[in-house]
Amino acid sequence: MAKKDRHVSETPATQWLRRHGIDFTEHVYDYVDHGGTAESARQLGWDEHAVVKTLVMHNERSEPLIVLMHGDRQVSTKNLAREIGAKSVEPCKPEVAQRHSGYLVGGTSPFGFRREGVPLYVEAGVLALPRILINGGRRGYLVGIAPDVLVAVAGARSVQCAN
């Protein structure tokens, strides 16, 4: 028996995408605590490398930043810090990430972020993909977009920090 399509209400991320005229597809899956991109890729039939995770981090001055990384890779915080001219970078605690983003951890999107002006960085390899899935602002909800949107519209800066 096929799953019935589920309606997903508007999120700050989808509002942002629509406001900027970005074409996107919607992909709903059953959210699993700590399942991450491996679980969403499995359920949706996508390669985990093309499912991009949104990570909220901060530098040594506790200034937030967003890093977009392939689902099957980790961020080398040492390499990232070197590339962006910071002394150090580390992940934010979940409650701090939620305060900066306005999203629950597991549903964080780089679009429609609560705090404006937060620097956005994207692993260079993500930009070489033909299409990506990225969080749409709710747990269990991804949007499919062309990766060039990240740089051209969202203002992301390309970095090489994958492990």
Image (tube, rainbow, N blue to C red):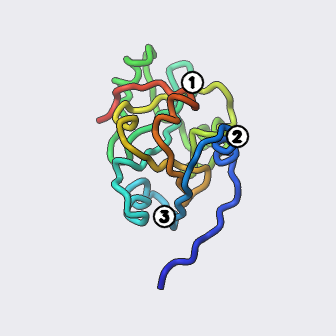
Coordinates of residue 102 in the picture (x, y in percent)? 67, 42
Of tags 1 and 3, the one toward the viewer is 3
Residue at image coords 46%, 39% = 147
Residue at image coords 64%, 25% = 117
Which residue carries the number 2 mark? 19
- Label 1 Cα crowd, 10 Å radius (few <14 / some 14-19 / many 20+): few
Of tags 1 and 2, the one toward the viewer is 2
Task: Say which of 36 and 91 sits in front.
Answer: 36
- Residue at the far left in the pictured view: 163
Which residue carries the number 3 mark? 32
Which residue carries the number 1 mark? 62
Please, what is the three-letter code of the amino acid marked with disc 2?
Arg
Coordinates of residue 17 in the picture (x, y in percent)? 63, 43
Rounded to the nearest angstrom, the CA distance separating label 1 from label 2 is 30 Å
Q: What element does badge 2 sit on? A: helix
Residue at image coords 56%, 44% = 94
Rounded to the nearest angstrom, the CA distance separating label 3 from label 2 is 30 Å
